[in-house]
Amino acid sequence: LDTCEVMNLVTGDFEPILGDAMATGANAIFDGTNLAVAFNVTDKVDFQSKLDEGLSQIKGINITQKFELVSKPLVNVQGMIDGITTKALEGFNKVTSYDSASCPFQDTYTKSNILQPWNAHLEKVIKDKITDYPLRSTGIPATYKRLSKDENAVQYLRRIYDAAGRCDGTSSCCLGNDCDTPSYNDYCTSGDDCIFVCSNLRDGIVDVYKGYLTADTIERGMAADLGIDQTTCPARVNCPATLEFMDMGHDYPLMELLDLYKTNITETSNDLISVASTSVGMAMVEVKDFLCHMNVSFIEQRYDQVSESFCETMFGGFAQVNWALWCLA
């Protein structure tokens, strides 16, 4: 029986016999504690909860909605870009529709025809209309028809707005080769009394038009770099257009880069969620299997069965035999 008492003392706490390190496992076996818990490894393998928490946050994010917070302001920026040439066009039309007695200019242009200004006068060309004033260069009214394919927009505008001068006197004023007919305030092309009152306005029209072309180049370049309309690039440019944008390492317009980034983020999110239900899911099955195998309480149960058989049944039988023999003696 002393042996059984010793066994009970030992299994109550193995540390005095086995030491602290080994006693941890032995004590866990006999008090029903999972070995993984006893050796503090559950936190290291139980990453499913942390992963689930992170994935739930990913699933809760509307990626498209988040990216719209960036894309919508860019659409507004496109509107501002479109306004660059709008102001320039307004300024241009102010000088081409000046319409004074000396410079009866009555023309207006739109964004659809200003780059090819002769298209703004197609109706006049069809009706064979000419300018209301003679030209300084010829002394006769000008046709609105483009003279040839070699006549560019600047040359065209300079020609049709090159109005003849006005006579400021009668002593020296000619219209072409006629120096006798022109009188005061008549049109003239030469002479000491011929004042070209529209020349500054003509030069202003040409200068403002060149400014419009510069603004148009800037606008189209910015629109191409921005790429709001991803189906087509602005006419006459590539996307992206500016060297500054390409020198930054961008091979696509900003909106397309944004869409590519959104696609990559979405695919990464989907991949993470897929991993959680496949690879990580399978890993967690292995983890649970591992934790299950770390439950060795059956050893303590088997020990109790052996202890009961040894200390109670067998030693109890010995005691009864000894008692019977003592009585017989």
Image (cartoon, rainbow, N blue to C red):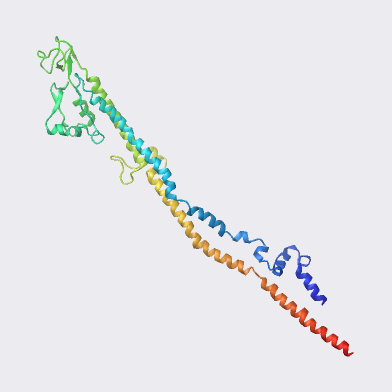
Which residue lies at the image location 79% right of the left edge and 70% below the top edge? Answer: 9
Corner quadrant of residue 17:
bottom right
Is residue 251 shown to the viewer in this render?
no
Q: In this view, does 245 lie above or below 322?
A: above
Write down the quadrant of residue 237 in the picture. top left
- Tally of numbered tags: 0
Is residue 284 depicted above or below 262 in this figure?
A: below
Q: In the image, is 166 to the left or to the right of 252? A: left
Residue furthest to the top: 171
Residue nearest the observer in this picture, 20 or 58:
58
Image: 326 above or below 288: below
Q: Residue furthest bottom?
A: 328
Front in this rendered view, residue 122 or 216: 122
Residue 265 visible? The answer is yes
Residue 188: image location, x then y, percent: 15, 17
* Residue 154 pos. (x, y %): 23, 29
Q: Quadrant of residue 97?
A: top left
Q: Nearer the viewer, residue 293 or 328?
A: 328
The quarter of the rendered structure image containing the N terminus is: bottom right
Q: Which residue lies furthest to the right in this view?
A: 329
Residue at screen point 80% across, 73% down:
5
Q: In which quarter of the image is the C terminus?
A: bottom right
Give how far across and how far down residue 30 sits, in percent.
Answer: 71, 69
The residue lying at 19 percent from left, 34 percent from top is 119
Residue 201, percent from left and from top: 24, 21
